[in-house]
Image: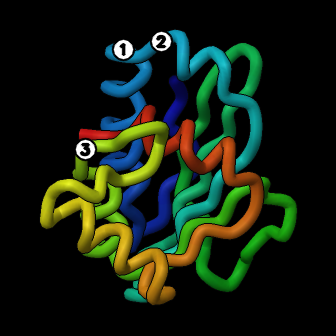
Amino acid sequence: MRLGHLEPDGIAPSVFVMAERGAALRPEIARALVGVVEIRFNQSFAHVRITFGSDAIDVEDRARDGLEKDADVVIKGSLSDIVGLLSVPLIGGVPRPTGARGRRALANVTSGRVRIEGDRRLARRLLTLLRV
C-alpha cells in the first residue's frame, strides 16, 4: 500500500485507510485486483485515483481539472452517496436489496445519483474490498 500525491482539498488518506483495512481483511481480493479506478466527487474535493498493480496498491488525489481518461472504472457521485455505497452489506459485490440501506444504495445507482462506468467486474471487486 502506498499513499501518493495529495491535494489540499483531497480525501485520498481516508480512501487509503479503507483500502488498507480491506486489503488486510481480504488479502485474496486485494491481490486479484488489477486496474485503475477513479472516484470523482460532485463536491469540490479532489478526485481519488486507486491503482491496483501486481506489487502494490497506490492511492492518490487527482486535481479536478487534470482528469485522466485511462481509468478502468470511474465512480461519480456525491461523497455521502459514495460512502453510502461503500457501507452497505453486499452480495456478489452488489448492495444487498433486503435492507433499507442496500435498497437506497441501489436506488442511487439506478437513478444516476451514483454512476459507475467501465469494468463492472473490477467495480464489484473494489466495492467488496473497500466495504466497511
Q: To which residue does mark 3 refer? A: 89
- What's the residue type where badge 1 is placed? Ala
In the figure, 10 relative to 16: above or below?
A: below
Q: Kindly identify which residue carries mark 1.
A: 24
Q: Which mark is residue 120?
A: none
Which structural element holds mark 3? loop
| Whether label 1 touches label 2, CB < 8 Å | yes
Circle nearer the N terminus (1, 3): 1
Is 29 situated left or right of 18 in this image?
right
Query: Farthest residue toward the left?
Result: 100
Quadrant in the rendering for residue 74: bottom right
The kind of residue on which mark 3 rests is Pro
Residue at the image position 43 percent from the left and 20 percent from the top? 23
**Which residue, given by chain and number where applicable, does mark 2 sit on?**
27
Q: Nearer the viewer, residue 119 or 50?
A: 119
Q: Is residue 118 left or right of residue 87?
A: right
Q: Are marks 1 and 3 in contact (CB under 8 Å)?
A: no
Total tally of numbered discs in the picture: 3
How far apart, in angstroms, are the residues tagged by discs 1 and 3? 18 Å
Q: CA distance from mark 1 to mark 2?
A: 6 Å
